[in-house]
Amino acid sequence: MSTPLVLVTNDDGINAPGLAALAEALAPLGDVYVVAPEREQSTVGHALTLHRPLRVDRLAERRFAVNGTPSDCVNLAVLGLLPAEPKLVVSGINHGSNLGDDVTYSGTVSAAMEGTLLGIPSIAVSLVGPEQGGFEEAGKVARLIAMRTLVEGLPAKTLLNVNVPGGRPKGIRFTRLGHRVYKEKMVEEKDPRGKTYYWIGAGPPLWDDREATDIIAVQDGYVAVTPLHLDLTHYGALRRLGDWEAPLNAQLRPRRKG
Ligand code: MN
């Protein structure tokens, strides 16, 4: 069997220590290619660059910096920068958690979504307390999960969102996404020129504390592995709301009474 290609990307930028730690941790698994944004792109979500040219800087044989988003990087890598299609996409190690509802804002998770949409098994890895270090432990966890994914594959349209607590994890738990509770206030202030500005997301995040979520697992000192599905259709709602179809159509094109 030939050596698999592994694509590593992130949203913290090409120079982030978490990216280097991930590439190093995955090196035993195959030929690791790094294609990452040239500067930090945290919270850009799933944005793609379609209205300006993308430039690629080849820093080494298998290391590229892109003036775009994490999703741009995955696209460019898969569509041509790499010599063949990667067998695995791993995004991270993000400097900070990507838990619960926050996954929808995350550039790290979006890169893994992009890989999944392109039909490649993909994993997002985040470290909850990056200021205390811990990239080495997180890299070890990433390698174990990546190895298993290379062998077993993943269900269709499914990616793994991995959050590693700071320090030495007590173990690994498979979890569901938790929910963020929005109690924080919007900050409204004046700038030095007297113009009003606003600041959102300023307070510490508050989370629900129900069982079996990624948030609880990480709080308990465990690695949280949450499978995320990219078919966002709510099939139950589709069945229930199907009743709306006929009356809405009647309103859209009322039949003239003869
Ligand atoms: Mn980030």
Image (spheres, grey):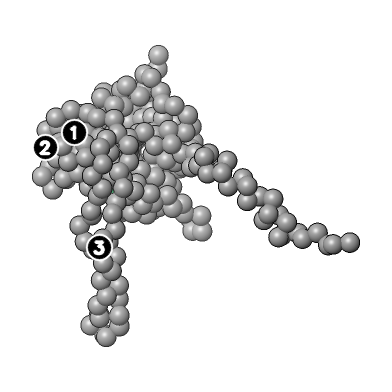
Please state which of the two labelled residues, at mark 1 or mark 2, is closer to the viewer: 1
Quadrant assignment for the C terminus:
bottom right
Q: Which mark is residue 222?
A: 1
Residue drawn 49% across and 36% down?
Answer: 118
Q: Quadrant of residue 31?
A: top left
Query: Looking at the picture, which amino acid does disc 2 mark?
Result: Gly
Query: Looking at the picture, which amino acid does disc 1 mark?
Result: Tyr
Whole-percent x, y for residue 151 in the image: 36, 18
Query: Looking at the picture, which amino acid does disc 3 mark?
Result: Glu
Whole-percent x, y for residue 103 in the image: 34, 46
**Residue bearing mark 3:** 184
Q: Quadrant of residue 191?
A: bottom left
**Residue bearing mark 2:** 167
Residue drawn 56% across and 44% down?
Answer: 240
**First in residue order: circle 1 vs circle 3:** 3
Please state which of the two labelled residues, at mark 2 or mark 3, is closer to the viewer: 3
Give the CA distance from mark 2 to mark 3: 28 Å
